[in-house]
Image (cartoon, helix red, strand yellow):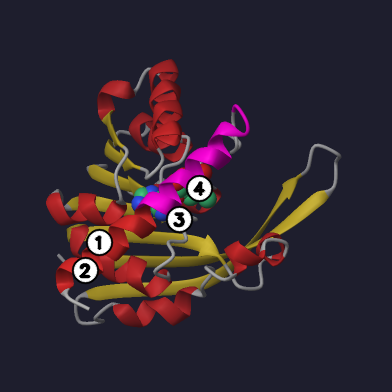
Amino acid sequence: MTEKADRTVAGAAADDERRAWDRRYRERDRIWTGHPNTPLIDEVEPIVTPGSALDVGCGEGADAVWLARNGWLVTAVDLSPVAVERALSHAETAGVAQHVTFTDEDLETVVGSRGPWNLVTSMYTHPAQGGRWLVETLAPAVAPGGMLLVVAHHPTDPHAAEHPSLLAKTFAAEDVAGALDRSVWEVSATLRERTTREPNGRERLWRDSVLVARRHG
Ligand SMILES: C[S@@+](CC[C@H](N)C(=O)[O-])C[C@H]1O[C@@H](n2cnc3c(N)ncnc32)[C@H](O)[C@@H]1O
């Protein structure tokens, strides 16, 4: 297959993915909790000097809003225009819209044309191309001295086990960490458990793959 044909296939796949996510978002007024993700807070809160941040697969914008509130200048990207519209509305309500640039593009297009950023985060994006591709694609977008934070559902995550199409896209952090050159990156790859409380009071267990990589300055 030629490079041009390859790109056409990739473009068609991205269109399918966009349509699928738009359909899912339209099913309900809000899908996600509206709260920032715990691994993001855990890793980013200790950073003393905020800078520029890229949030890929930003969904309804809770992480982008949290980052902006904490002093980051954010670029937030999601394939789904429906999600991006909601994320912008969340940022406006929170009074931080002037600190976030939202865009409904494929993450690969954005990292290929802009940046670098001091912080690049991907929270549960799970692209069809897989976790290693995600890390390889995002790594060049991190500025020297910056951080790459990739969080995904672990293959043993109980939620993923209930959704076969999601399960097929899960990955373990240690299995994708090999994409990063250790002479350039300090890497931590862990499996972390957390629990949330369901509306019916039941506790729910989550198992996250957390890749934290700091690029040497
Ligand atoms: C599970 S949701 C997570 C949303 C948000 N990060 C959160 O944690 O609430 C995954 C999001 O990634 C987006 N997405 C999937 N593939 C993408 C891609 N190639 N480029 C940009 N966004 C993508 C989807 O549209 C969806 O909103």
Disc 1 target residue: 8
Q: Judge the density around disc 1: few (<14), some (14-19), many (≥20) Cα neighbours within 10 Å.
A: few
Label 2 and label 3: CA atoms lie apart by: 25 Å
Separation (CA) of disc 3 from disc 1: 22 Å
In the figure, is residue 57 to the left or right of 161? left
Say whether residue 142 is left or right of residue 209: left
Q: Would you identify the image quadrant in which residue 188 lies?
A: bottom left
The label number, if any, that marks residue 20 in the structure image:
4
The dominant secondary structure in magenta is helix
Which mark is first along the chain, 4 or 3? 4
Q: Is mark 3 within 8 Å of ligand 1?
A: yes
Q: Which one is in front, 198 or 31?
A: 31
Mark 2 = which residue?
5
Secondary structure, mark 1, is helix
Mark 3 near mark 4, Cβ–Cβ under 8 Å?
no
The relative height of residue 28 versus residue 37 in the rendered view (above or below) is above
Name the amino acid type tagged 1. Thr
> Secondary structure beneath disc 4?
helix
Q: Position of residue 169 (x, y in %)?
A: 52, 68
Tell me whether the residue at label 2 lies in contact with that at label 1, contact meaning CB atoms closer than 8 angstroms.
Answer: yes
Is there a contact, CB below 8 Å, between mark 2 and mark 4?
no
- The stretch of residues the image draws in magenta is 15-29
What amino acid type should be assigned to the residue bearing mark 3? Thr
Report whether residue 139 is seen: no
Magenta-colored stretch includes residue 20: yes
